[in-house]
């Protein structure tokens, strides 16, 4: 029996790990674990950075699409401008000025119902159908006349409508620049807003 017990102990010693082997195995397991944790942490950081970049890129695409739409439907060619609003002369600029089309036709009439609008006039009546945007202070009107003046609206006053036709008394910052004869020919205009 003693010999079988000795044989069993010998067999168990041969199958068991030594302390050195256990220490090496624990160290290797720890090193692999730390590497896996480092890779997972780096993946989480890169994933959050990638999500932030994707959100920024998506927002940039939305802004570019909005600028594209506004430029496509602008009343005139976009103009490069400096920060003070003056036209840029070089190949770089601080911004872009667009003339966003609001609507047409707006019919121009003389304030007192007379026939002519003097070249020095800064007031006239705009008549337009319901559904077109109301002219507001800060909007611009491009008159369909020989000089095609672009006039900034400085004041708007409501007038009594004429049936389905809305009427507004418009005051502009500058004069019309040429005599207009609304009873001899139709004087129209397009409304737009300048955006930078």
Image (tube, helix red, strand yellow):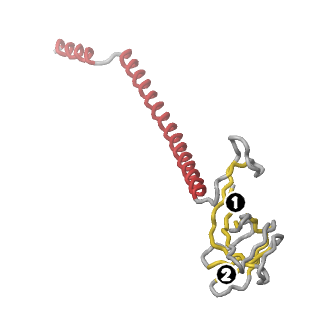
Q: Residue at x 62, y 74 (%)?
A: 132
Around disc 1, counting alpha carbons within 10 Å, would you say few (fewer than 14), some (14 to 19), or many (20 or more)?
A: some
Above or below, 164 against 56 in this view is below
Of residues 190 and 188, the one drawn nearer to the viewer in this rendering: 188
Which residue, as the protein is rendered here, is positioned at the far front?
184
Q: Residue at x 38, y 15 (%)?
A: 20
Which quadrant of the figure has residue 98?
A: bottom right
Cα gap from disc 2 to disc 1, whole angstroms: 24 Å
The residue tagged 1 is 194
SS state under label 2 = strand
Residue 155 visible in image: no
User: Which quarter of the figure is the C terminus placed in?
Assistant: bottom right
Which residue, as the protein is rendered here, is positioned at the far right?
120
Q: Position of residue 63 (x, y in %)?
A: 58, 52
Q: Position of residue 174 (x, y in %)?
A: 81, 66
Q: Position of residue 68 (x, y in %)?
A: 57, 53
Residue 119 visible in image: yes
Which quadrant of the figure has residue 89?
A: top right
Of residues 104 and 14, the one drawn nearer to the viewer in this rendering: 104
User: Which quarter of the figure is the N terminus placed in?
Assistant: top left
Q: Earlier in the sequence, mark 2 or mark 1?
A: 2
SS state under label 1 = strand
Above or below, 19 against 188 in this view is above
Around disc 2, counting alpha carbons within 10 Å, would you say few (fewer than 14), some (14 to 19), or many (20 or more)?
A: some
Which residue, as the protein is rendered here, is positioned at the far bottom?
163
Above or below, 98 against 105 in this view is above
The residue tagged 2 is 166
Residue 176, label in figure: none
Q: Residue at x 40, y 25 (%)?
A: 29
């Amino acid at each position: 029996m003693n010999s079988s017990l000795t044989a069993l102990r010998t067999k168990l010693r041969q199958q068991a790990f030594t302390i050195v082997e256990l220490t090496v195995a624990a160290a290797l397991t720890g090193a692999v674990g730390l590497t896996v944790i480092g890779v997972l942490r780096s993946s989480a950081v890169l994933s959050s950075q990638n999500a932030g970049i994707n959100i920024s890129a998506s927002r940039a695409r939305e802004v570019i699409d909005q600028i594209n739409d506004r430029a496509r439907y602008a009343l005139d060619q976009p103009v490069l401008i400096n920060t003070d609003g003056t036209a840029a002369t070089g190949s770089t600029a601080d911004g872009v000025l667009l003339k966003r089309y609001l609507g047409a036709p707006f019919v121009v009439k003389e304030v007192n119902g007379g026939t002519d609008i003097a070249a020095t006039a800064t007031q006239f009546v705009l008549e337009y159908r319901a559904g077109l945007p109301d002219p507001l202070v800060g909007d611009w009107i491009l008159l369909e006349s020989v000089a095609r003046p672009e006039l900034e609206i400085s004041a708007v006053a409501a007038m009594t409508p004429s049936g389905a036709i809305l009427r507004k008394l418009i005051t502009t910052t500058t004069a019309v620049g040429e005599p207009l004869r609304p009873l001899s020919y139709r004087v129209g205009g397009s409304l737009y807003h300048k955006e930078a």
